[in-house]
Amino acid sequence: MHSIMQQPFKNAVLILVWGWLLFLVLAPNLLVVGASVMTRDPVSFLSLPLNLDAYRQLFDPLYLDVFLHSLYMAAMTTLVCLLIGYPFAWALSKVGKQRQLVLIFLLIVPFWTNSLVRTYALKLILATNGLLNSALMSIGLIDEPLQLLYTEGAVIIGLVYLLLPFMILPLYSVFEDLKQELLLASHDLGAGRLSTFVHVIVPLTLPGVLAGVMLVLLPAMGLFFVPDILGGSRNLLVGNVIKNQFLDARNWPFGAAASIVLTVTMAFLMFAHRLSKRRIGEEGA
Amino acid sequence: MKKLALAGLLAVGLTGCSSEEPQVLNLYNWSEYMPQEVLDRFTEETGIQVVYTTYDSNEAMYARLKLLDDSAAYDLAVPSTYYVSKMRQEDLLLPIDRSKIEGFDNLDPELVNLDIDPENQFSVPYLWGTTGLAVDTADIEGEPVTAWEDLWEDRFDGRVMLTNDMREVFHVGLRVLGYSGNSTNPDEIEAAYEKLAELMPSVRTFNSDAPRMPYLEGEADVGMIWNGEAVMGKDTMESLEYVYPEEGIIAWLDSFVIPKNAKNPEAAHQFISFVLQPEISALISEEIGYATPNLAARDLLPDEVANNRASYPNATDMINAEFQTDIGDDALQVYAKYWEMLKSGR
């Protein structure tokens, strides 16, 4: 590479990457950290002295409760995404190349529509006089419309709908890398289907699972517009608390502290992901 | 709400990129609070493009304007009463040059020169309205609903809708207990919270985006609504009634203000004058169902609008009515805490 890459070009790329990281990643995050240790001010939003009150407020039972409920809904979302995404990704890696392209294309098409618009569309389906209820009633499965909208379930459905592709894509890439020879070897050595799945397929696809979990779990706690639209502004996520603190309560230090909790959780998950990758790498060697 | 806000942001971004000359008015307004026709006619008449962005709460609007940076450079916003005084005191507004405003004398003398802005140095009334009870008469049985208190009845379990507005929801709680909706007494606010917490299991949803929608969608049968939304909702669903609760209605007045960092205050003045024309004010009131403070416009309204009690309450309807006032930051923090407890309690 060194011989191909001209010195000025290399420098330009490095400056771009570092500049990007410094100004668009590090600086904003430092601002958030800075805001989180300042004092709330009704007129100028933030003021001195520095203190940790915002973090103390996080341990208020009220917010602990919101955080746990949010984690629960995000975990359910992740589980459902995994249960659907895992077999989907597996099947995707099995079909012919042509069909694979079509399926991946279909997976990505919804991204061309803004997620907000798609969430509103989901509302039309789940409403009392919406498509789902009218369909179920017309085929006689139910007599009374089900109350789907503005429930915890509706929030989870919305989150699964928006985040499923983020689970499927990393899983698809590990299934693509899964060597057929390893499965055959396992089979030749006398392992049954279940045994091969548990001892060969699952460990080899674990990095994909963890990557998918990371891409789903954390965003699921932050997508505040989903509870706003489908949850009737109840069933709050951590994202709603952060948004409310910045927009309604104007408690910036607390909003910043809450978002740092999300960032730290993310960092922790990424750390776990790396550990697991290393462990699998060693086992493979 | 957000869909519109997002579309608005997109529009701002797009106009920001173009380098052409046409003048632009950045208007920041409540969602569903200005007929498109008015904007079109303004552009037709003046050649000024209107970039229309919306918000669904005073708090959200204030938080954006407070930044006073380019990302929030609006030429005109429409805060409610208590936010006019707050923003005026915090020096966020440009004074309105009355010599550039035509038709100010058309405004109802009772709605100008209020405490929130003496002499109307910083604000010009746009519309006023009320928050009252919505009742889907087709879906409820038994006694008619006449008071906020009725929302607590068992028969409405899971069928109640509240606006997603902290001050309004607590106003209801406070009035039911016989306190002022503008209470700053922490004990009274706490009592209102306790009362509202009893109502929460019945509450199906909060909505300040388009509060008529949960009624039209069949998700809620009874609850809070803004009068204009009730008027618009009745066009679609005949059985949606607007009721003036016995404890008293919540009244508000929304006014045009020009933020300090406005890029085109000239166009803002032009737009205010444009709206103050009796014909335009009448059109707005007729389209979106809120009451115009423009007396000259009221004479132009068709009878069915002028006599619609939902839009234009009579003296009896306004008994016990209370205008929202600025309660100060300390009280606001108390409300905010209980509001979060209320909404996260399950």
Image: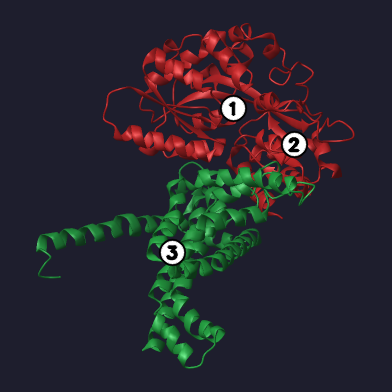
Total numbered labels placed on residues in the image:
3
Q: Position of residue B174 (x, y in %)?
A: 75, 38
Sooner in the amino-acid sequence: mark 2 or mark 1: 1
Q: Is residue B257 above or below residue A6?
A: above
How far, Cα to Cα, is label 3 from label 1?
Answer: 51 Å
Q: Which residue lies under the disc numbered 3? A: A169
From the image, which quarter does the C terminus of chain A lie in?
bottom left
Can you tell which mark lies on residue B219?
none
Q: Which residue is nearer to you in this view: B168 or B24?
A: B24
* Residue at the image position 65 percent from the left and 28 percent from the top: B229
From the image, which quarter does the N terminus of chain A lie in?
bottom left
Residue B181 seen in the figure: no
- Badge 1: residue crowd in 10 Å (few <14, some 14–19, many ≥20): many
Q: Which residue lies under the disc numbered 1? A: B81
- Chain that bears disc 1: B
Residue A106 seen in the figure: yes
Q: Nearer the viewer, mark 3 or mark 1?
A: 3
> Disc 1 marks which amino acid?
Thr
Q: Are marks 2 and 1 on the same chain?
A: yes
How far, Cα to Cα, is label 3 from label 2?
Answer: 44 Å
* Chain A, hue in figure: green
Q: Which residue lies under the disc numbered 2? A: B223
> Disc 3 marks which amino acid?
Leu
Q: Position of residue B286 (x, y in %)?
A: 62, 16
Q: Which residue is nearer to you in this view: B138 or B327?
A: B138
What SS does tag 3 mark? Answer: helix
- Badge 2: residue crowd in 10 Å (few <14, some 14–19, many ≥20): many
